[in-house]
Image: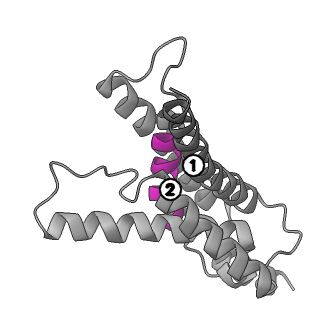
Amino acid sequence: MSSKRASTKSTDSSGPDRAIMNALLVISALGGGIMLLVQRGRLSWPPYELMASISTIAGCLALVGPFVLARPDAAKGGLGELLWMTAGVLVWVLDVSALAQGQWRTMSWTSPLGDRLMGLTILAVLVAGWRCGLAGRNWSWTNVTGWALGILWIGLAVSTWVARAGGFAGLASR
């Protein structure tokens, strides 16, 4: 009985080492996002460019998503994890593509698609995943984080339309 328990523990991928690595990845993503905001001069009080700052932080979290979610039991993941993984892989693919094309100096590494296109892409994945039956009640921290990021990106996409519509309404009334 004890040999069976020992062999199960040795192949378990969700042990304390995995949790520490995930925590380090998330903390480094948040720290990197804050460092980018400080470097660009966007971190101020009161926060004038709050949506751009949140988009940068979300992009940094997207970059570590594929590494956090890469585990053998990924088949048990939820829709939030699918959103986070899709966004992360999308950002990585676009970053590598820009690097290969020599656009690394002008590239927005954390949000290469922009808020509207990323939000619409995540909305499409959300609807497709929902229709495929992936919307279970999985309350793991990775699933909840994926849902929060997905809702944030969709909200940013909607906010670009609201801001643009408000700008057009202001011009029409003059």
Indicate left or right for 151 with 101 as reference.
Answer: right
Q: Residue at x 15, y 48 (%)?
A: 105
Residue 14 shows in this picture: no
Examine the rendered structure and indicate whether residue 69 appears above or below residue 158. Answer: below
- Mark seen at residue 37: none
Q: Amino acid at mark 1?
A: Trp
The crowding category of the residue bearing disc 1, from other C-alpha atoms within 10 Å (few below 14, some 14 to 19, many at least 20), is: few
Nearest the eye: 38 or 77: 38
Residue 13, position as x, y percentages in the image: 64, 72
Cα separation, mark 2 vs mark 1, equals 8 Å
The overriding secondary structure of the stretch rendered in magenta is helix
Q: Residue at x 78, y 78 (%)?
A: 130
The crowding category of the residue bearing disc 2, from other C-alpha atoms within 10 Å (few below 14, some 14 to 19, many at least 20), is: some
- Mark seen at residue 161: 1
- Mark seen at residue 116: 2
Dot 2 or dot 1, earlier in sequence = 2
Residue 112, position as x, y percentages in the image: 35, 57
Q: Which residues are magenta?
A: 55-66
Asked if the residue under mark 1 is in contact with the one under mark 2, i.e. CB atoms within 8 Å, the reply is yes
Q: Amino acid at mark 2?
A: Arg
